[in-house]
Image (tube, coloured by chain):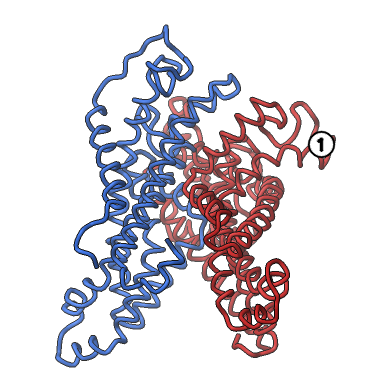
Chain colours: A red, B blue
Amino acid sequence: MQILSFLLKKLTYLVILLFVVALITFLLVSLSPIDPIRAYIGADMLQVSPEQKEQIEIYWGLKESKPEQFISWITSLLKADFGTSLIYRAPVSEVIADKFFASLLLMGIAWILSLVGGIVLGSIAGMRQNGLLDRIIQLYSYVLVSTPGFWFGLLLLMIFAVGLGIFPIGLASPIGMLEGNVSFLDRLYHVILPALTLSILGTANIALHTREKLIEILKSPFILQAKAQGLKGFSLYKRHAFRHTILPAISLHFASFGELFGGAILAEQVFSYPGLGQAVVDAGLGGDVPLLLGIVIISAGFVFVGNFLADVLYKIIDPRFRKGLMKL
Amino acid sequence: MKKWIPIKLIVPILLILVLYIVAIIIEQKELAIDLNQKNTAPSLTHLFGTDWLGRDMLIRTWQGLSVSLTIGIVTAFCSTIIALLMAVVAGANKKFDRIVRWMIDLFLSLPHLVTLLLITFTLGGGVKGLMIGLIVTHWTSLARVLRVEVFQLNNSEFIQASRQFGKNYIWIVWHHFLPHLYPQIIIGAILIFPHAILHEAAVTFLGFGLSTDQPAIGIILSESMSYLSAGYWWLAFFPGLFLLSITLTFQYMGKQVHRVMERNDRYDSGVNN
């Protein structure tokens, strides 16, 4: 029952959140000075007569009042109809579904890389607190946190793709190959450099967090007892500290889906990787309002899922919550 | 708190000041276009190399820096004010607190960069759009910290006593909250700075921010993309490194200010230094 009400609460929250996000983006776009017809037609604007312009306005419903426009937009959103993308000339939902897979692969690999890397680095640093290794790892993490991710991507591109020629310069599949012939290995090969770029920021954050957490745990009484019983080094870490550090780290990592998405936009741009991030940039630069709004709403859902999983991990997987020792 | 300001704090402040002043001085200088010198690798005459028009990259980067620093300072200042206002409003009563919490959650519910792109898109890009976008998206984390502080202060005895004496909320904010909050405010403002300039560079890099004729590190980096496969590594390497050293300096400055201001935290200062 408790879990059910928890889920219900979260679901209500999601619905309200998506509604508010939709409302605000709608307001922003409708208040903006951008003329949707000019954005749609672009340079050919001079060839469109005022009568034609008026017809397009009626066809698009631009003559209706703003609340009417919003209601009709929201009702079509509820039917999963995001409208038609202007630059891809296809339904927005199809464009998003298509790009989402590529982005998911990229973000998934980067996510796992930074989680594993961060926990390993953070654990080493925490166990060797104030040692040489700890200082090096801390310095490394602090520098990476301040590094512009896309610049790091450019460096990787210069070193590994241009200089050494080990990895491809961009795109998600070999040039000139048909969609059906692209194997998973091809995709993996193309995703490595962008994923590496994307993972560095997360790695540094997780490493710093794990280190803090581990140091805190190492001060607790049960560690003192374990030490008194002769445990030390790796076995102490494995038996008593590991499980305590890993859960908050994973939770934090889930909660940072927003940064992951933002990083993906930049990484995709650097590597010309055709994912959601590139689509949102193209949509913004090309004045493709339906696609832009669609991606904004999808990204809000994505961040919500991350936060939700972070919550669930804490509340359901942690045995102390599960057994009712702590309140849900 | 020690009376003198430690050298570790003076160095980064001086460094930033000197960089900024030099940047302002050279900002107006027209860069000589020298087509005989185009795309030359770094050398003693051109430390950062030259670009496709033979312009010196060091000076271009430095000019870009002045724009970045100005944007960073304005953003840090305005975002801090918004954060403070939000925290103070949240402290007034429970209903306001809920509204403020909702606002924070709402801003965190979208990826930061997506919010920025959306705002700069609707405002039509340019310095103005970029600046507004940066200001309205950077206040959240500091507002969270300050909200908790205000909440704790609100429940402390001396505030309750002050209220019993009939002081109104504004008076309490001015005379009790601000003196307590100011270390957090200053550190928060300093730490907003590197975020703001990294985001500025990123948004500009994506083509949403500053226009291409303005000197900006984001523009330089996105321009360099076309020359990467030709092997002109210096076009991207040095400007990015410059940006990185600025953000690092600010991180360091924030840390030092933290140490100076919170001397009474000496309890675990051995861990964090």
- Nearer to me, B158 or A43: B158
Q: In this view, does B152 lie above or below A60?
A: below
Question: Which residue, given by chain and number where applicable, does mark 1 sit on?
Answer: A182
Q: Is residue B128 above or below residue A236?
A: above
**Within the image, what quadrant is residue B173 found in?**
bottom left
| Secondary structure found at label 1 | loop
- Residue shown at 46% from the left, 25% from the top: A47
- Nearer to me, A290 or A155: A155
- Nearer to me, A284 or A221: A221
Chain for numbered disc 1? A
Q: Is residue A44 visible?
A: no
Callout 1 crowding tier (Cα within 10 Å): few <14, some 14–19, many ≥20: few
Q: Is residue B240 visible?
A: yes
- Residue shown at 81% from the left, 42% from the top: A184
Where residue B41 appears, as percent x and y from the top left, is 48, 17
Q: In which quarter of the image is the C terminus of chain B?
A: bottom left
Q: In this view, does B10 lie to the left or right of A190?
A: left
Q: Is residue A130 left or right of residue B15?
A: right
Q: Is residue A293 left or right of residue B272?
A: right
Q: What residue type is disc 1 on?
A: Val
Q: Is residue B213 above or below residue A121?
A: above
Where residue A178 appears, as percent x and y from the top left, is 80, 31
Where residue A58 appears, as percent x and y from the top left, is 48, 45
Q: In which quarter of the image is the N terminus of chain B?
A: bottom left
Where residue A197 appears, as percent x and y from the top left, is 61, 43
- Nearer to me, B94 or B37: B37
Q: Residue furthest top?
A: B36
